[in-house]
Image (cartoon, helix red, strand yellow):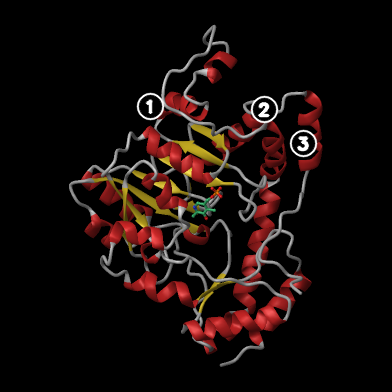
Amino acid sequence: MIDIPLNRVVPLGREMDYVRQAVESGFVMGGGPFTERCEKLLQDCLDVPRALLTTSCTDALEMMALLLNLEPGDEVIVPSFTFPSTANAFALRGCVPVFADILPDTLNLDAADVEACITPRTRLIVAMHYAGIPCDMDALHAISTRHGIPMVEDNAHGLFGRHDGRPLGSFGSLASLSFHETKNFSCGEGGALLINDPALIERAEIIREKGTNRLQFMRGEVRKYTWVDFGSSYLPSEMLAAFLFGQLEAHALIQERRRHVWNRYRTELGDWARSHEVQLPFVPESAVPAFHLFHLLFPSPDARLAVETHLRSQGIYAVTHYQPLHLSDMGRRFTGEGRSLPVTESSFNRLLRLPFYTSLDDSAQDRVIAAVRAFSV
Ligand SMILES: *Cc1c(COP(=O)(O)O)cnc(C)c1O
């Protein structure tokens, strides 16, 4: 029986009070006071001109494709080592995902390989900050500027992480966040679109509201609202925003807890990792990580599987990810037997994520640490 899961959502602040408040107020559709409070908090903390809550990170990525007017045949450079939505949101509009390789230390986009993927049809570069550890934003920004190709961030892992003192999510013209159950802050299913290019704000509000100017109407800026553009239903309900606000409001406490868990793994597993040739997460000097997950990189897939199985037998749930997108059934439709991505291909199978969540207490974590250390090849 599994008694230490990979992940768990526990209310830590006033989440339940706020949900009750939202329900009792009678305003439960989207766009009410809790939505506004979440958005204002994100804008203030991340120094972005506009944040829009969305129904998921996937939906925020879909909104990017609409906002940037991407068209069938446009090429979008994405890491292969990521969740499918990073590519799917663009594929949905007929774009061709072009998969770039990652660096062996951070497992983030390899800027040199990104540059090698650029063709006359390239329209966008999507950076994803794996585990909440920043990509080399200086190198990616330089490439984006040199080639005149916009960059956006899939920041599902990176909320409250920083590169050179600047919040992740404030680098791309657009960035997405996820509030899925598995992320640092959660309302079950949810997300946000961060808009750093002010020229995109008005249309983003319309796209989120089924292609109508309903938000302008609610602000009293127009007398009636009508269908003015493409759009879909990307606005979460106030019940979800209320729960989320309880989480976001407690961000200092939540991030401090996660930093504690993360640091303990790194300290307590340091000697064991060195003697077993296991690579622990690498944090560049310029980075403040977002403490999203903690992973081990084993010398071989067999060693990873052995530890995974051993932990499972102790009631501890640890998993590997991501199946590289360029090797997936769907990815192959775009790449055929295309070029190989050596670092991605050699890494994913050797990676194990340890249980990691805000409420993981020291004694449960001690059990995980002891079980890992008990393993020797
Ligand atoms: C979780 C995740 C997503 C999808 O988030 P949803 O909110 O579930 O749509 C997208 N990209 C990455 C990198 C993720 O980890």
Residue located at (61% from left, 36% from top): 41
Say which residue label 2 marks: 29
Position of residue 11 relative to residue 325, above or below, is above
Quadrant for the N terminus, please: bottom right
- Most distant residue in the left direction: 120
Query: CB under 8 Å between callouts 1 and 2?
Result: no
Q: Which mark is residue 199?
A: 1
Badge nearest the viewer, 1 or 2: 2
Q: Which mark is residue 374?
A: none
Real-space Cα distance between discs 1 and 2? 27 Å
Question: Ligand 1 within 8 A of label 2's CB?
Answer: no
Q: Earlier in the sequence, mark 1 or mark 2?
A: 2
Residue 345 appears in the picture as rendered: yes
Q: Kindly identify the residue that appears in the image at 69 percent across and 76 percent down.
A: 368
Residue at position x 43%, y 54% in the image: 128
The residue that mark 3 highlights is 19
Residue furthest to the top:
223
Label 3 sits on a secondary structure element that is helix
Observer-nearest residue: 215 or 97? 97
Residue 198 % position (x, y): 41, 28
Label 3 or label 1, whichever comes before in sequence order: 3
The vertical placement of 112 against 34, above or below, is below
